[in-house]
Amino acid sequence: MIRTHTHMFRDQGLNETHYDVAAHCFAEGLQTFQVDQGLIDKCMTILVSMRVVFEYGAQVAEREKTMSKEKMKTPPLASPKTIGTDQEVVLPEYPLG
């Protein structure tokens, strides 16, 4: 998830606020299609667990702004294992095209 959204974290300021809006729209869509509320609740429980990825991606992108190009080459890549740590990391590149 971090890798596929790197360009949006860096270039478009993607963060947890955008995630919240998308999750809300998803829940409303399920309700519009009259999906059973129990199933909606299960879906939202799974979806909510991904919010931390968007918080973290936005934080790493913000820290990258203070790093030189040289410095950006040395830290390890952000990953699920580095979420919640103080480890200095950079966002992974995702090959487009």
Image (spheres, rainbow, N blue to C red):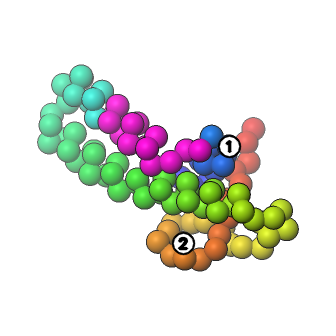
Callout 1 secondary element: helix
The span shown in magenta is 13-26
Majority SS type along the magenta span: helix
Please indicate whether residue 47 sits to the left or right of residue 71 in the image: left
Whether residue 81 is visible, yes or no, is no
**Residue denoted by label 2:** 82
Residue 27 in percent (x, y) is at 28, 35
Q: Can residue 24 be found in the magenta stretch? A: yes
Q: Can residue 53 be found in the magenta stretch? A: no
Count of marks overlaid on the render: 2
Residue 16 in percent (x, y) is at 45, 49
Instruction: State the residue at coordinates (27%, 45%).
Output: 43
Instruction: State the residue at coordinates (26%, 51%).
Output: 45
Amino acid type of the residue tagged 1 in the rendering: Asp
Instruction: State the residue at coordinates (38%, 42%).
Output: 20
Amino acid type of the residue tagged 2 in the rendering: Thr
Q: Quadrant of the C terminus?
A: top right
| Quarter-of-image position of residue 19 | top left
Instruction: State the residue at coordinates (34%, 31%).
Output: 25
40 and 58: which is toward the camera: 58
Question: Could you classify mark 2 by the number of other residues whose Cα lies within 10 Å: few (under 14), some (14-19), or many (20 or more)?
Answer: some
